[in-house]
Every structure is written in structure tokens, then in C-alpha cells.
Image (tube, rainbow, N blue to C red):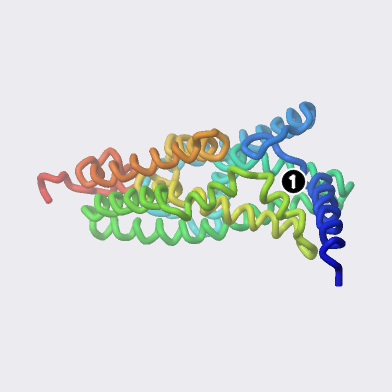
Amino acid sequence: MLSWNHQQEYTPMRHSRTFAFTSARSPTPTGAGGGLLPARDLAAAWFLVVLIAVPAWALTIGQARDMGVEPGTMGMALPLFLLLWVTMMAAMMLPSMAPVAITWVRGIGRQSSGWTRTWRTVEFVGGYLLVWTVFGLLAYAALALTGGLVEDHPTAGRWTGAAAFLLAGLYQLGPLKYVCLRHCRDPMSHLVRYAGFRQPARDLRVGVHHGAYCVGCCAGLMVVLIPLGVMNVAAMAGLAVVIFVEKLWSRGPLLGRIVGVAFLVLAVLAPFQDWLLPGLQGSMPSMDRM
């Protein structure tokens, strides 16, 4: 057993080894976490982000143009919905999670090469998208439920929309949102934690872990796609901007609370303003005939 003096000597050595480990494997990203990547690496990484995000947006917009905005799942089978959902999430989420992704993938590149590097990168991205796919199952169920409700009871759309805005607003102002947002705004702290993850499937677990926090951060915002329409491109673009600013701007948490209050206001207005509910517009009669 180490004496107290030996422990004092040992602890800094252990910390220095941990620091070296995390520095080699998880360099600090640009953005909310602190330091910067080398300019050349940073430019190349953001170019890759744009290269992926732009086609994802193009596919999403093209599909939305063909389908329009309707209640529920718009007749999509689950596999097609999930494929479209993952594409949408890639378009909306990739810019805001880029600092963490860039840093982790760069760390993979330092440790691995060839097919090993490619496989580890696929594991990380796959883990992240897996979480959003699971969330997509919940979204599909919610949309199927609300779509059926509006079809059977057209006037219920107003109150369904109000409930969705209310839920989104309360979530935006609640503690779970900000636990997850703190995680997403402080990449270095969780990259240090991820450096301690061990095999097997280490990079898959990192992707799942970070994806779970990302879902927790954005779940309230996703709820408003029920009243606004899951294929509403303007709503998706607006939410993507909010997500990006929340995570990367110094006053992002304040914006999150402002958005939460705005959702509560919309919850009050929704039963009386049909134009706020394009995603629930069946054949809702006017309020005068209710």
C-alpha cells in the first residue's frame, strides 16, 4: 500500500498520463469546448461537413417538395420514414455536432490507418445515427397517433397542437434539457471521458453516448414538428439554426429559454390560429362552428 507521500507523487503522474492519453486521442475541438484545431485540418473538416450536410438538405427538400405538409406519417411505411428521418437528422444535426465529430474522428486518424480508421469512423457515426433512428421510431408512433386522431376528430388537431407546443415549451425550460445542453456545449469534458472507454466497440459506444445526449438536448424542439409538419422545410431550417446556436453560441442557453417561452405562447394561441398548425391541418372547421 502506498504511503501518503508516495500517493502525492503518484497522483500527479497518473494525471499527467491521463492528460497525455486524452491529448493524443481527443484534442480539444473548436467551438464551445476551448482550443482550436490546426487551421488546415479545421478547414478540411468543415468542408467535409458541408459536403455531407448539403446533399442531406437537398434530399430532404426534394422529398418535402414531392410530399407536402400533411398530418401524421403521410402514408409512409416505417422503413421509408426512418430512412427519410435519418437523412433529415443528418442535415439538421451535423453542423452543430461537428466540433465533437471532427475532433473524435481526427483522434481516430492519429491512432489508426487504412481500413481500421475507416471502420472506427463508421462505428462512431453509426452509433450516433443509431440513437436518432431509435428516436425516429418514437416519432413515427407519435405521428401515427396524432394523424389518426386528426383524421377521426378534425377539431382535435387544435388541442393536439397546443399540447405539443406546451410539452415542447416545458421541456425547453426543464432541467433535463440543460443537463444535456451542458454536455453538448462542453466537448472537451466528455471527450476526456470518452478517452477512457475501452473495447469492444469503443467508437460505437462513443457515438451512442454522444447521440443520446444530443437527443436529450433536442427532443423538445423535435416535438414541434408534430404541429408544424414533419416535412416542413422552413420549420426544419429554423430548428437547425436554433440547435446550432444553442450549442455553439456563448448565450445559447438563454436562446433555449427564449424559444421555450415562445413555444408556451404558441400553445396558448394554437387553438385559435389554424395557420400555426400546418402539420395537423385535416379538415378542421372554424372555431365559430365548434
Q: Is residue 94 above or below residue 125?
A: above
Label 1's element?
Answer: helix
- Residue 180 drawn at (x, y percent): 54, 51
- Residue 155 drawn at (x, y percent): 21, 53
Q: Quadrant of residue 195?
A: bottom right
Say whether residue 255 is left or right of residue 271.
right
- Residue type pointed to by label 1: Trp
Q: Is residue 98 above or below residue 206?
A: above
Residue situated in front as seen by the camera: 150 or 123: 123
| Residue furthest out toward the bottom | 1
Q: Is residue 74 visible?
A: no
Q: Is residue 217 visible?
A: yes
Residue situated in front as seen by the camera: 145 or 223: 223
What residue is shown with label 1?
A: 104
- Residue 30 drawn at (x, y percent): 68, 34
Say whether residue 262 is left or right of residue 9.
left
- Residue 111 drawn at (x, y percent): 87, 48
How busy is the neighbourhood of tag 1: few (under 14 within 10 Å), some, or many (20 plus)?
many
Q: Quadrant of residue 232?
A: top left
Give the total of numbered labels: 1
| Residue furthest out toward the left | 288
Q: Is residue 101 above or below residue 148?
A: above
State the residue at coordinates (47%, 55%). 176
Residue situated in front as seen by the camera: 273 or 282: 273
State the residue at coordinates (59%, 49%). 183
State the residue at coordinates (85%, 67%). 3
State the residue at coordinates (30%, 59%). 149
